[in-house]
Image (cartoon, grey):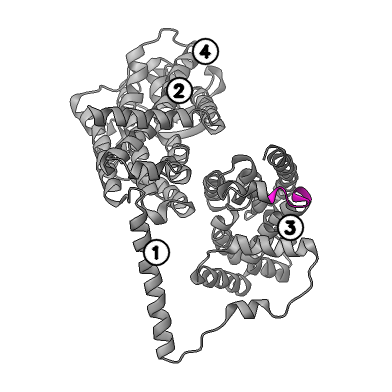
Amino acid sequence: MRELRVLIHLVRADFLERVRRYSFLITLGMMVYVGYLAVPPIESGALTVNLGGIRGIYNSAWVGSMIALLSSMLLSLPGFYLVKNAVERDRRTGVGQIIATTPLNKVLYTLGKAVGNFYFLALIVAVVVIAAGATQLLRGEIVYLDVWALVAPFLFVTLPALTLVAAVAVLFECVPFLQRGFGNICFFVLYTATIIVSLSGATFSSQGVIEQPINDLFGATVIGASMLQAAHTAFPERVLNFGIGYSYSEGPIETFQWDGVNWTTGVVLGRAVWPGVALGIVLLAALVFKRFDPARERRGSARRKGARARVLGLTRSLHLPTPDLARFLAFPRFALPPFGRVLVAELLLALKGLRWWWYVVALGLFVAGVTRPADEALRNLLPVAWIWPVLVWSGIGVRESRHRTGSIVFSAPHPLWRQLPASWLAGIIVTILAGGGVGIRLLVAGEWDHLLAWGVAALFIPTLALALGVWSGSSKLFEALYVVWWYIGPVSGVPRLDFMGLSDTAIAMGLPLVYLAGTIVLLALTVIGRRRQIYTS
């Protein structure tokens, strides 16, 4: 009974801390808006779930299933970044050291954090359910609400997927190398792979799903099979398919009656696999969790120091020269003006902690960009070169809040017009150096339009990082947004989101000038946000 009370208090504390954030309201508003878009107006000719130019009548089953399926897929990504802070917050605020002195065991702690994560995400889903019912009544095709048909898809499709997200967030916080930016990027890669794998084993036909894979995390095959079976009964002569995404039908959209998935015991147990997997992940997190034990951290630090000492001893025994990097960098010494010294300091802070292999990869991308043909360098190397420094950019603008040095930095002379521009220019320098090989190649080849887009992107990326860092106080927002934007726009070739100008379509649309204007707006917002930080610190 005591353990249950402790678990309840852990969940309650995490929940109350999160619902007070602006990010909670923003995510909530975005999901409600996505639910509204998922049910297009009757006369618009738009489809969210496309079965081949037909759709189900907007009853509770259809509306609930469409919004539940989209929520399962779309909320999983921002939801992870929203809840991946519970353990870190305890570590940062000193609560973890207090917990380390209590008899609270690791399994109960990680379970409490996972339940708190799920409870928070479930609250968002509950609001989306209410909005789904309101959307059905607003469209007005069927004004009768069937509560079970509306709620069941969220219970058996959306919530099981979110239990896994809640557990994975705890695991990532307990594994040291996944705690920060690298883990955020890894989750996006995992999320993208999961969407692909979820449908990889499914075979859709006019009668439904012939083979329904067990690895369908998001529930697309469960809902898709039932929809296709009902559509085939209503239109046996039509060639049917199943697609998720906003599309328009060329002809009039015909409708059919669909009463929802038949939630049999087998279907429900199939969806219950994912909470079981989530429980296993929580136990794995407890296994690797150090429970804020400073003795373990000291032992790890001692092992690292011992390894460095052994390497240094081996170097000396072999009589290898040991370069004095500090003296090399300090010679010659130039008399820089105050702003120049601040700029150099910001650049060194941005690059601090990077390993030697990071510079080797960056140098290899630079050399490859110079030597390869302009078209190949632009389309193949530039996206890689401008994803490599993402963890460098994400630290711009957030160091003051991360290390609690705002009161010191903002009390220095001219923090708004000296330190902030220096941070911005340091980010631009990193961006230019990372993609400099491709830029040189475009200059030599005379690709002036793409060179203009390259220059605008070199300004836009660090400005976006700085603006999001100043306003959010965290690096996660930029890491999540930029990686998604990078994947959908430059990599996947969506012209309007191609801020690098890789495609000729983006150039023809004049998007470099649009992103240049966006850079100016972001810079103005950054100044406003930093001024607010200075006056409130």
Question: Mark 3 or mark 1, which is nearer the start of the sequence?
Answer: 1
Label 1 sits on what residue type?
Answer: Ser
Residue, disc 2:
128
List the residue tagged with mark 1.
301
Q: Nearer the viewer, residue 226 or 529?
A: 529
Q: Amino acid at mark 4?
A: Leu
Which one is in front in this view, the residue at disc 1 or the one at disc 3? 1
**Residue linked to disc 3:** 452
Q: CA distance from mark 4 to mark 2?
A: 15 Å
- Which mark's residue is nearer the viewer, 4 or 2? 2
Q: Can you tell which mark lies on residue 78?
A: none
Asked if residue 213 shows in the view, the reply is no
Q: Amino acid at mark 2?
A: Val
Q: In this picture, which residue range is highlighted in magenta?
A: 409-417
Q: Which residue occupies 37% across, 39% down?
A: 165
Few, some or many C-alpha atoms within 10 Å of disc 4 (few <14, some 14-19, many ≥20)?
Answer: some
For numbered disc 1, what is the local secondary structure?
Answer: helix
| Left or right of 377, for residue 448 | right
- Badge 3: few (under 14), some or many (20 or more) residues near its Cα, within 10 Å? some
Dividing the picture into quadrants, the one containing residue 437 is bottom right
Q: Amino acid at mark 3?
A: Leu
Return the residue nearer the eye: 370 or 107: 107
Q: Magenta stretch: residue 299 in it? A: no
Mark 2 residue crowding within 10 angstroms, few (<14) / some (14–19) / many (20+): many
